[in-house]
Image (cartoon, rainbow, N blue to C red):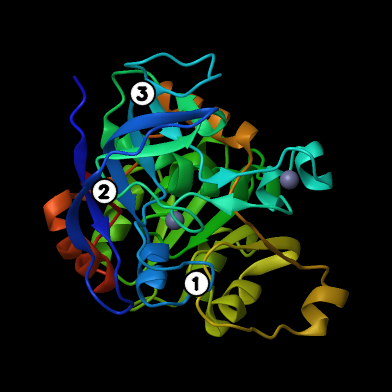
Amino acid sequence: MLQKTMKAAILKEFHSDLIIETVPIPSPGHGEVLVRVKASGLCASDLHIQDGMLPTVTLPFTPGHEMAGIVEELGEGVTGLSVGEHVVCAIDITCGVCRFCRRGKQNLCKSLVRIGFERNGSHEQYCVVPAENLFPIRRDIPFAQAAIIPDAVVCMYHAIKNQGKVTAGDRVLLLGVGGLGLQGVQIARYFGAQVYATSRQDKKLEIAKQFGAHGVINTRTQDLIEEISRLTQGEMCDVIFDNIGIQTSIETCLSVLRPGGKIVVVGYNDSQFTASYQDLVIREKEIIGIRGSTRQDLAEAIRLVEDGIVTPYVSNTFSLEEINAGLHCLRRGESFGRTVVLM
Ligand SMILES: [Zn+2]
Ligand SMILES: [Zn+2]
């Protein structure tokens, strides 16, 4: 018989720790599913939420948008899922009828609601979500790895496949390899690219190499332009993923991008950047963004994980009781890959 209460990590005040509280287990409504959360990823967005930077978040609030778990109970009208099935959960709840949804660009839906942003998320033992957001995943995929597919893995997948349009032989640079970049190395390899990665930490570069990077550059001790020029025999990069997102990182990207090449802005920290008309008009360099992913992307990313082509890289795990320690670790930049709370 289902227990009636659960533990949830709740943000009650901005700029303060989450508080673990015992609360009633929610019931799934029509078209919804109660998921027993087994793993919930921690993301830089959780820090932004804690810092009060997201105007759509109202307190008290349970964050968490990278969820893997087991179907516990089906709400009325739910078909196609069964109790006990392992699932991961798409973050975006989309309207299905707007111009973007109808064209398969659910990530740009006009009425977007995000789990763990505009409604309570998965830093809790049980979470109710729309059935439509759930994707079954094979039982032998560890929950910690599964949890980061709907965010870290699939965002890089969308960035590399749809925005960067990476194809075999492309010289791809991942500027800044951490929680996102280390997934990106594997995905860019899958598309047949020559993959280069940068970091200021040798440990991260070591991991990038293990995941198949052809060349790594420590930007603290090495000259990026010189190294890229050497690695590409002066051709420079075809596609660059900027996981840092500050003025100087965009400038750096433009300096090692070939004419006609693309910069995909994945991370963003500064509110604005400038670029030269020369680069855009004379050299036809493109700077494009990426937001989330589509349902199709998620289905494909799950497949890559199930087929062993991509191994979601989780470097740190914490229990729900230790969630604040996990968030502090993330804030101090101490984690090499993604950080996940295991229930
Ligand atoms: Zn996130
Ligand atoms: Zn829509």
User: Does 258 sit left or right of 223 as displayed?
Assistant: right
Task: Give coordinates of residue 197: x percent, y percent.
Answer: 44, 59
Residue at 50% x, 77% y is: 269
Which numbered disc flags the more N-terminal residue, 3 or 2?
3
Which numbered disc flags the more N-terminal residue, 3 or 1?
1
User: Does 325 sit left or right of 92 as displayed?
Assistant: left
Q: Is residue 96 above or below residue 110?
A: above
Which numbered disc flags the more N-terminal residue, 2 or 1?
1
Quadrant location of ligand 1?
bottom left
Q: What label does residue 71 carry, if any?
A: 3
C-alpha distance separating marks 3 and 2? 20 Å
C-alpha distance separating marks 3 and 1? 30 Å
Q: Residues within 10 Å of mark 1 (few under 14, many from 20)?
A: some
Task: Give coordinates of residue 149: x percent, y percent.
Answer: 43, 39
Question: Residue at label 1?
Answer: 54
Q: Residues within 10 Å of mark 2 (few under 14, many from 20)?
A: many
Q: Quadrant of the C terminus?
A: top left
Callout 2, which amino acid?
Val
Q: Is residue 212 above or below residue 327?
A: above
Closer to us: 75 or 142: 75
C-alpha distance separating marks 2 and 1? 22 Å
